[in-house]
Amino acid sequence: MKPTATAAALTAVFLLTAAAPIDAPVWAAGPTRTAVFAGGCFWSIEYAMEKQPGVLKAVSGYAGGDRPNPTYRSHQGHLEAVEVAYDPQKTSYARLVHAFFRNIDPTDAGGQICDRGHSYTTAIFVTTEAERQAAVAAKAEVERVLGKPVATRILRGSPFWPAEAYHQDFARKNPAQYERYRKGCGRDRALKAVWGAAYRS
């Protein structure tokens, strides 16, 4: 398994400029940009983010760890994550961060809903200073709205490794199985308890 093209480019940049400041350009300029979020089960975050205006595609995968070629059975150190490709003419990074937060329980430091452990913890991977500032501002706003500390980490971008093919578009390809998982996990009930009317499944 290989990291995405953007992730491969990012790896090269990191190797060449390990001490580069966070505002050093990483993603190539172009009509499509990417954002990486870890929000527990990647099926659910992929499903939620693909519904956002301006999003072109969401890919389930792994990020944040040191080991290359992670798999579902062996991704120690990595988080389940989703790489979101979006059109910056139709949405913004800040709007995607806003949507991401409202599809997770950002106060949960041990995982998400029924999925527990490090790989299910939440994070926003940033690659520029502008992204970092947007993530920090959104996190502060969430803490203000919820009145609780936010456990979601803001991490420097790292290579994103796509998950196995059977994980991609899982909710769309396997609607009955995904719905059983979602209901069994209690995802909607838990997120409504956190966000109230601001949560949209």
Image: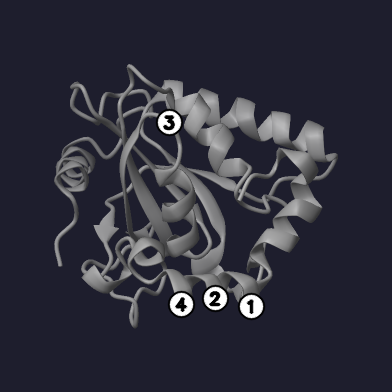
The residue shown at (16%, 38%) is: 16
Q: Residues within 10 Å of mark 3 (few under 14, many from 20)?
A: some
User: What residue is pinned by disc 2?
Assistant: 181
Q: Position of residue 93 (x, y in %)?
A: 44, 27
Q: In whole angstroms, how far apart are the C-alphas of marks 3 and 1?
A: 28 Å
Q: Nearer the viewer, residue 140 or 115?
A: 115
Q: In whole angstroms, how far apart are the C-alphas of marks 4 and 1?
A: 11 Å
The residue shown at (44%, 61%) is: 42
Q: Can you tell which mark lies on residue 177?
A: 4
Give the mark nearer the N terminus: 3 vs 1. Answer: 3
Q: Is residue 100 above or below residue 110?
A: above
Question: Mark 3: which amino acid?
Answer: Pro
Give the mark nearer the N terminus: 3 vs 2. Answer: 3
Image-based side of 162 in relation to 197, left or right: left
Q: Can you tell which mark lies on residue 184?
A: 1
Q: Nearer the viewer, residue 86 or 68?
A: 86
Question: Mark 2: which amino acid?
Answer: Tyr
Question: Mark 4: which amino acid?
Answer: Gln
Q: In whole angstroms, how far apart are the C-alphas of marks 3 and 2?
A: 25 Å
Q: Position of residue 9 (x, y in %)?
A: 15, 41
The residue shown at (41%, 64%) is: 171
Q: In whole angstroms, how far apart are the C-alphas of marks 3 and 4?
A: 26 Å
2 and 1 marks in contact (CB < 8 Å) = yes
Q: Residues within 10 Å of mark 1 (few under 14, many from 20)?
A: few
